[in-house]
Every structure is written in C-alpha cells, then in structure tokens.
Amino acid sequence: MKLTSASLLLLLSHSASGFSLTMGTGNSFGRVFRISTWGESHGGGVGVTLDGCPPRLPLSRETVQVDLDRRRPGQSRITTPRNEADAVEILSGLTPDGITIGTPLAMVVRNKDQRSQDYLENDMSVAYRPSHADATYDAKYGVRAIAGGGRSSARETIGRVAAGAVARQILKLYNGIEVLAYVSKVQDITCENVDDDTFTMEDVDSNIVRCPDAESAEKMLARIDEIRKSGNSIGGVVTCVARNVPAGIGSPVFDKLEADLAKACMSIPAAKGFESGDGFEGTLLTGKDHNDEFYIDPDTGATRTKTNRSGGIQGGISNGENIVMHVAFKPTSTIGQLQKTVTRDGLEVELRGKGRHDPCVLPRAVPMVEAMVALTLVDHIMMQQAQCELFPNEASIEDSPNPMGTTAEREGGPKVGAISERPVGLKVDEE
C-alpha cells in the first residue's frame, strides 16, 4: 500500500499538531467509564473491554446474562430466528468469587449459529441492500465484511449490553438508580396508560412487543405481524426512564447530559431520532406552558418540579426528577420484498433479501437503549465525583442550595416559612 506525502506528514507530525490516531477509531465510548466493543456478526465472537470499572463491585456472569437474554435473537416470531444462546464469558477483571478488582473487564460471547453462505452464495455478496450500511462501509474502507453485515450488525450491541449490565449494578448501589425502557410506539400506534414512576421490567417483558400497556401491545403486535407476513419491516419509538438520578449530574455547554445521552442512543443500529423530555412536542407550547414550575416537597423539604417536560435535565444537568428520553428506530433495512439497488461495480439490479432478520427491531432495542443510558450515567457520575466531590462541601445548610430531586431530603424537613405570600421580582439581562 502506498502512502501519499500528505498522509506521511500527518502521521509523522501528529505530536506537533495535537492530532492522535488511536486503534479502534469509532469503537469506543465513554471517558472515565469506557468501553471498546469488538467482533463481527459472523466472526468467531463478539465482546467488550470495559475500563474504569470501580473495584470491589459484586458481579457475576449470571447478572450480565440477564440483560443479554433480553437482547438475544430467536425470542419470538417478531425477532430474527437466528438461534444464539449468547452465553457470556468474563475473561478478566474479576476475582473467582465475583468481585471486580479495578482492572479491565473483558467479556466475550461466541457466535454459534451464523450462516455465512446466506450472504456469500447469492447476489447479496455484490449488491448493496438499500438504506443498509453495506454501501457506506465499502465507501469508507474499500472492503467490508459481507456476511451478517460485520460491525454494522445489531450483534455488535452484545458488548454494549454486557457492559451496560455492569453499569446497572453500579447505578443501583450508588443511589438506587433504575434505568428502564419500553416500546412506546409502533408506526402510528402509541402506547397509553404508562406511569413513568411505577412501571417495572416485569411489566415491560410481559409480552413479546415489550410494551407495558397490554391493550396497546396487542395492537402493536397485530401491526408487526401484518407487516412481517408481507415480507416487509416496521419501525417505531423506544422510551427510556432513569429514576433516582441525583441532581447535578452532567456538565454545561459541550458535555451536557442530554447531548451525551443523544450520542449514546443514536449510536445504536437503526436509531434515527432522539428526544429529551417533551422534545419536538414542546415546540408547540409557550414558555408559560412548557416551564416546569418548582415547589418544595412538604415531606422531604427538597426542591421539586410540578411537571417534567424538561425530562429531568435543565441546562444539560440533571435536576433530580425522572430522566425521560425517546429514541426513534427506522424499519429494518433487510426486507423480503423486491427493491432496486446497485452492485459494488456499479450495475443497476433488483434485490430481494433472504435469510434471517428482524421484521421490527424495537423489542430487542429496549435492552440496548437501557445499556447505553446506564453507561452514560455511570460515566457522568464518575466525572462528577472526580471534579465536584473531590473535596467535601463544608458550607452550612443555610449557605448551601436547597437539596433537589426525588431522592433528596433537607435536614430537619422543609424550611420554616418556605412559602412567600408575595411575588419575587427578577430583572434579567441575557443575550
């Protein structure tokens, strides 16, 4: 392979320019709590290396397997029938009795049921699937893993979900934080009657659609079945709620919590949209209607909001309410109907997808979204600990901001005379 003079100059002068090229570009996520996933859909296996995991965390293979079982293929008639047990092996970073030791955790899942001939012995070896990553991977690298889609396959998310299970354990021990997602929309069928404060994982997993509202789930399933039988695919929305996240998590400007959550969720295969709180619907309201008014919780004395249109994040920083987000997923690219496309060498052809694939990614996207949200929260919590909690805040109660959020509590209860009978004037001079 010949390198141009410009390429050589770039590689040789990276230290002077501040540029650095690292292995696995685009395959790592996080800053303090950092994962790197690896492997292809039809290779020997897929996995993850997790660095930055705190020591002395109780962890077992079975704990990780719970989330992988929710993600794995072959669960029902509306997921790909590829038959994989997705049994995880933890190779490092753990004592024999299940305690993390602070060094990198390496986890692997071996591929067992790949059928590479489904791709290599027909036109799919040379023809690009419309709206799939086939063409763009070829354009970027000049070569691609044809069988199973390689790294663009949803099988890559095994590493994320495995690491997300570790993050889930950390969140639970840190502040009783729960991260739960569900299918809230399939095409134009919207989920009704779900309380973000109370729905459980058992409610979500009570049906194969993963919608906690049984009546809506039946309608969604009927629509998915209708589309599936016609050889087509369908998309929708996954809603995720993070409960008990303390106020103060996230950073201003470029490292806003919802910005990192958006990047995390938009990195999931087939994700095409992200909303924080009311999102685009909030644009239909006035400021008076959209603002979440504050009040003092009469039991805990903490500062709370009467509504949660902000989705638990204001100014890029958590306010202690439920963090709520919505992730839109497109219909699966591989379908069993005839489509026009082109071959690698530039010929126009027609292609019909064959083999095993999801008619709807939504049910299996639920644990993927949970994993990416959990990973992001742990990363931000660890950065908060490093910057803002390195030294204890020894200010008195009167000199400190009132505690904020669902899990916060003011020492001694609500402040006496906390309710003022007259409005407070505020003169503002902002850009």
Image (cartoon, helix red, strand yellow):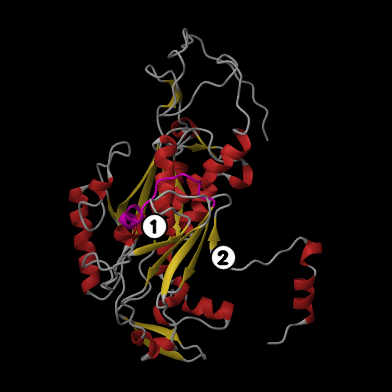
Q: Position of residue 252 (x, y in %)?
A: 61, 40
Q: Which residue is mark 1?
A: 368
**Is residue 380 found left or right of 112 in the rendered image?**
right
Does the segment drawn in magenta span residue 58? yes
Q: Amino acid at mark 1?
A: Met
Under tag 2, what secondary structure?
Answer: loop
The magenta stretch spans residue 384: no
| Count of numbered tags | 2
Residue named by callout 2: 26
At label 2, counting other C-alpha atoms closer than 10 Å, the crowd grade (few under 14, some 14-19, many 20 or more) is few
In terms of image quadrants, where is residue 290?
top left
Give the x, y percent position of residue 425: 59, 16
- Residue 325 visible to an observer of this rendering: no
Q: Amino acid at mark 2?
A: Gly
Residue at the front extreme, as displayed: 96
- Quarter holding the C terminus is top right
- For the residue pair 320 and 53, the one nearer the viewer reads as 53
Q: Position of residue 382 (x, y in %)?
A: 55, 42
Mark 1 touches mark 2? (CB < 8 Å): no
Residue that appears at 30% across and 58% down = 70
Tell me, yes or no, if residue 91 can be seen here.
yes
